[in-house]
Amino acid sequence: MTSSADHSPASRQGSWSSKGFWISIARIVLLEVALLIALAGAAIVYIDWSSKAAFAEFLAATKVPSPGSPVQAVKSRATCDRST
């Protein structure tokens, strides 16, 4: 027969105490939140960098030549004389 002392919280001390368990859970949650913040920061930095690069490429592609720079003439095609 078991006594009431066998069912007390003090007798169920295994490798984890109640306080140690919750401290471990809190550490894991804090680590996950820190990792999430770091990943979000990295994503924001990457998006900012790529948008600046894309904007610079857009500006370079739409740049109008200055009046002093030589402009190449468009080659015209010779008309085709077809005798029908």
Image: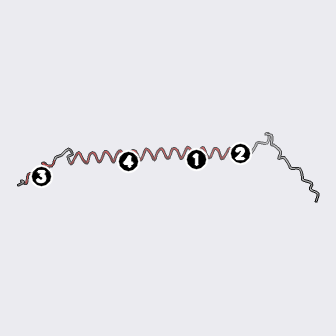
Q: Are marks 3 and 4 in contact (CB under 8 Å)?
A: no
Write down the residue under mark 1: 51
Q: Quadrant of the C terminus?
A: bottom right
| Callout 4 amino acid | Val
Q: Residue at x 59, y 44 (%)?
A: 52
- Mark 3–mark 1 Cα distance, whole angstroms, equals 62 Å
The residues tagged by marks 3 and 4 sit, at their Cα atoms, a distance apart of 36 Å
| Identity of the residue furthest to the front in this view | 84
Whole-angstrom CA distance, mark 2 to mark 4, is: 45 Å
Q: In the drawing, what numbered circle is on residue 33?
A: 4
Residue 9, numbered circle: none
Q: CA distance from mark 4 to mark 1?
A: 27 Å
Residue neighbourhood size for the residue with mark 4, other residues' Cα within 10 Å, grouped as few (<14), some (14–19), many (≥20): few
Q: Position of residue 22 (x, y in %)?
A: 25, 48
Indicate which label's residue lies in the foreground, 3 or 4. 3
Q: Earlier in the sequence, mark 4 or mark 1?
A: 4
Where residue 21 appears, x then y in whole percent?
Answer: 24, 47
* Dot 3 amino acid type: Ser
Q: Is residue 46 above or below residue 84?
A: above
Q: CA distance from mark 1 to mark 2?
A: 18 Å
Please give left or right for residue 82 compared with residue 21 in the image.
right
Q: From this viewpoint, which residue is outermost toward the bottom?
A: 84
Check disc 3 and report the residue beneath it. 8
Residue nearest the observer in this picture, 71 or 84? 84
Secondary structure beneath label 1:
helix
User: Please, what secondary structure does the residue beneath circle 4 have?
Assistant: helix
> Quick check: marks 2 and 4 in contact, CB under 8 Å?
no
Q: Position of residue 32 (x, y in %)?
A: 37, 47
Q: Which residue is mark 2?
A: 63
**Which residue is painted at 60% across and 43% down in the image?**
53
